[in-house]
Amino acid sequence: MEPVRARAMQHPDGLIDLSIGSPVDPTPDIVRAALNAATDAHAYPLTSGTPDLSSAIVAWFARRRGVTGLNASNVLPTIGSKEFVAWLPFMLGLGDGDVVVHPRAAYPTYEIGATIAGATAVAEDDPADWPTNTKLVWVNSPGNPDGAVRTSEYLRACVRRARELGAILVSDECYAELGWDAPWDTARIPSLLADDVRQGSFDSLLCAYSLSKQSNMAGYRASFVAGCSELIAPLTNIRRQAGMMVPQPVQHAMAVALGDDTHVAAQKEIYRARRNTLKSALESAGFRIDHSEAGLYLWATEGKDAWESLDRLASHGIVGGPGHFYGTHFPQHIRLSLTATDERINSASHRLLGQ
C-alpha cells in the first residue's frame, strides 16, 4: 500500500483515507458521562461482566436482535471483538488437523486466529462444502468487507450443517445496526441466535457484537459474545485465568450505551448521508457497487485488478483497500470506508466527479 498512499499524498488538496474503518465521530456524551461516573474502580473487574452489563446485553438482544431466552450465563464481555476472533480457536483447543471455516470475502483475523491455534483455515460460504473435519465456522453478517446480509434461511442451513459436523458456529454481527438497502433499511437484520434461526437451542452457537461501530466506542474496546452457556462457561474461566477482563468503567459505559437507542439512530443517519454521497460518486465514475446492503463499507469494482483501481483513486488523492487483502476470491474489488468526516467524503465525491 505504500506506493499507493505516497501517490495519493501528492494530491494538492490532501489525502482522503477510506481504507480503514475506524470511527471519526465523537463518542456520545451519554457514554462519556457514564465512563467518567465509574472511574472509582478500585476492585478487579468481573470477567463475566457486572450484573448491570449482563442484564443490558440480554435486554439489548431481545429488543434489537429478536433473541429471547438469554440470561447472564449466556453472555460474556470481551476486550473488543478482534481479540475474541483471534483467540477463540486457541481457547477452544483447536490445532493440527482441525479446520476453521470463514467466508470467502473475509476479515483477515478469521484466518489469523486459525493460524495462531495451528489449525487450517478454509474459505467457503456454502455449508454443503464445509469439510468433515470442520471444528469452528465463522459467519459474518453484515459482512466485512462486502456488506452482504445473510438471510434467516441461510443461517438456518448453517446451523443444521454445523450440528451435523459437531462444529461450533459463530456469527460476527458487529454491523447489525447499520442496514441500508431494502429490506434491511427497515427490517431487522437476521441474527444467528434469533428465535426463528437457532432451531430451539443455543447449543454450539455463539454471536459476537461490538459497540465500536454503533456507538463510536472503538477506543473503549467494548464488545461481547452471547450464546451457548456450555461454551461461555469455559471461555469465561480461561479469560479469568489469563486476565482478559473488560475494565469496570468500560463495563458501566457499555451498559449505558446498550440501553440508549437514540444515539445509535443518530449515528446511522450520519453514515447514511456519507454512503449516499460516496456511492453516487463512485457509480458516476464507472464503479459497480456489489452487496454493501449494510455496514460501513462500499464493495466496489470497475472490472479491473484492484491495484489498478487503487492507482486510479490515488490519482485523486483517495486511498481504499484492495480485495486481495480479504482473500483470493475478489481480486477486482476494492473496499471503501464510510468512516471519514463529512468534509472528506464530500471532497472525495467532488474529485471523482471531476468537480
Image (tube, rainbow, N blue to C red):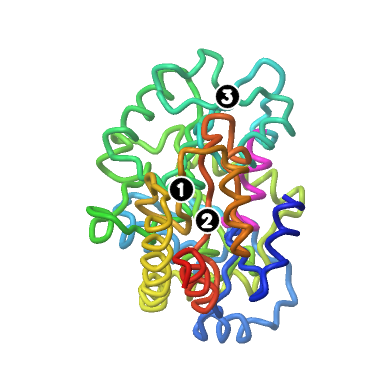
- The one nearer the camera, 74 or 83, is 83
Q: Is residue 50 left or right of residue 57?
A: right
* Crowding near the residue tagged with mark 1, few <14, some 14–19, many ≥20 C-alpha atoms within 10 Å: many
Taking the magenta stretch, the answer to whether it contains residue 83 is: yes
Q: Element under label 2?
A: strand
Q: Where is residue 19 in the image (x, y as percent from the top left)?
A: 61, 57
Q: Does the magenta stretch include residue 2?
A: no
Residue pointed to by mark 3: 122
Say which residue label 1 marks: 300
For marks 1 and 3, give the CA distance: 24 Å
Q: Which of pointers 1 and 3 indicates the residue nearer the eye?
A: 1
Q: Distance between the residues labelled 3 and 2?
A: 25 Å
Sequence-first disc among 1 and 2: 1
Which residues, given as a range, are shown in magenta? 77-89
Q: Image quarter for residue 227?
A: top left
Badge 2 crowding class, 10 Å Cα cut-off, few under 14, some 14 to 19, many 20 or more, is many
Q: Name the N-terminal-most of marks 3 and 2.
A: 3
Which mark's residue is nearer the viewer, 3 or 2? 2
By secondary structure, the bulk of the magenta-drawn segment is best described as helix
**Residue lying at 47% horizontally and 49% vertically, measured from the top left:** 226
Do the numbered discs 1 and 3 sit on residues whose CB atoms are within 8 Å?
no
Are the residues tagged 1 and 2 within 8 Å (C-beta)? Answer: yes
- Eyeballing the image, is 21 above or below 256? above
How many numbered marks, from 0 up? 3
In the rendered image, the vertical position of residue 74 relative to residue 115, given as above or below: below
* Badge 2 amino acid: Leu
Position in image of residue 134 (x %, y %) = 54, 20
Crowd band around label 3 with a 10 angstrom C-alpha radius: few (<14), some (14–19), many (20+): some
- Residue lying furthest front: 354
Q: What residue type is labelled 3?
A: Val
